[in-house]
Image (tube, rainbow, N blue to C red):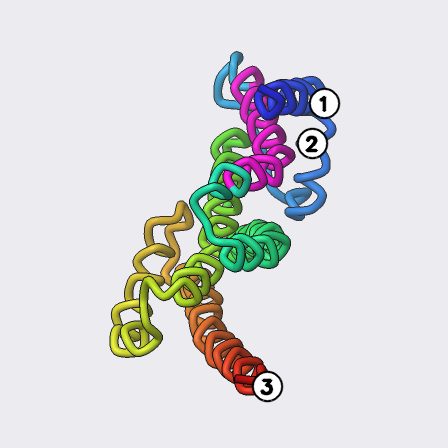
Amino acid sequence: MFTLVAFVIATSVGFVFYEDIIRFLINILSLQGINIVFTSPFQFINLSITCGLVTGLVIVLPLIIYQVFHFLKPALKKKEYLLLGRFLPFSILLFVIGFFFGALIMKWQIEIFLTRSVSLGIGNILDISGLLSTVFLTSALMGLGFQFPIILLLLLRFGIIKRHQLTSKRSWIYLCSFFFAILLPPDSIIADFFLSFPLIILFEITLLLDVVMERNRKRREQKVPA
């Protein structure tokens, strides 16, 4: 109930101040040279609702993660619970990084669109609702995609999967990362490549971290007297 109340309040704030949010996004995404239009007299209502929902989800996400963490506590051993607790801040941090990385890629795509339209002497018109919905969706999904290493590392530390199983399926994981990027809203093969690249890098970093953590665990066990 507390999470629901926080979501309603945050959504209401985003709904009320949606004009300020849109102006902020227009400045961040460098949309000043693009003709941005409404295509429906009722579109501003949908846009304000979208701004409110996204604001609500972003603000309550840490609270949702904490609720899930607290819900799983009775089913975990003490060491597993402490391990999950150490990973919790990194999970939130990775979501924020992934969210802004998705927004950065969208900004880059918009700049390419504007540059090409100017160089070719072609006019440009963008639907503001569709544009911001695409930016929000891409950013949010990239934030979720950046949770991939946290999930893998937890599965490795809990012994559910083994590192050699992941390394043997490395090419398939690379391919799945690219397919994930293809399913995102940007319809550009170059954008798909740049969106999939950090997921692949995070996968390799996860394997390295597992090696380091395993070595540290063995060292601690060797120091413990028999």
Q: Tell me where residue 126 appears, x and y as whole percent.
A: 51, 36
**Is tag 1's residue or tag 3's residue first in the polypeptide sequence?**
1
**Label 1 neighbour load within 10 Å: few <14, some 14-19, many 20+:** some
Say which of marks 1 and 3 sits in front.
3
Out of 89 and 219, give the one closest to the viewer.
Answer: 219
Taking the image as drawn, is residue 214 in sight? yes
Do the residues under discs 1 and 3 have CB atoms within 8 angstroms? Answer: no
Residue 62 magenta-highlighted: yes
Do the residues under discs 1 and 2 have CB atoms within 8 angstroms? Answer: yes
**Is tag 3's residue or tag 2's residue first in the polypeptide sequence?**
2
> Which residue is label 3 attached to?
223
Q: Residue furthest front?
A: 226
- Secondary structure found at label 1: loop
Q: Tell me where residue 208 appears, x and y as whole percent.
A: 48, 79
Taking the spot 71% from the left edge, 43% from the top edge, the residue there is: 27
Query: Considering only vertical position in the picture, is 68 above or below 180?
Result: above
Q: Tell me where residue 119 appears, x and y as whole percent.
A: 54, 58
Taking the spot 54% from the left edge, 86% from the top edge, the residue there is: 222
**Label 3 neighbour load within 10 Å: few <14, some 14-19, many 20+:** few
Q: Residue furthest top?
A: 42
Q: Which residues are magenta?
A: 44-68
> Which residue is label 2 attached to?
21
CA distance separating discs 1 and 3: 58 Å
Taking the spot 46% from the left edge, 46% from the top edge, the residue there is: 141
Out of 132 and 15, give the one closest to the viewer.
Answer: 15
- The mark found on residue 17 in the picture is 1
Say which of marks 3 and 2 sits in front.
3
Query: Considering only vertical position in the picture, is 187 above or below 133?
Result: below
- Total numbered circles: 3
| Quarter where residue 167 is shown | bottom left
Q: Amino acid at mark 2?
A: Ile
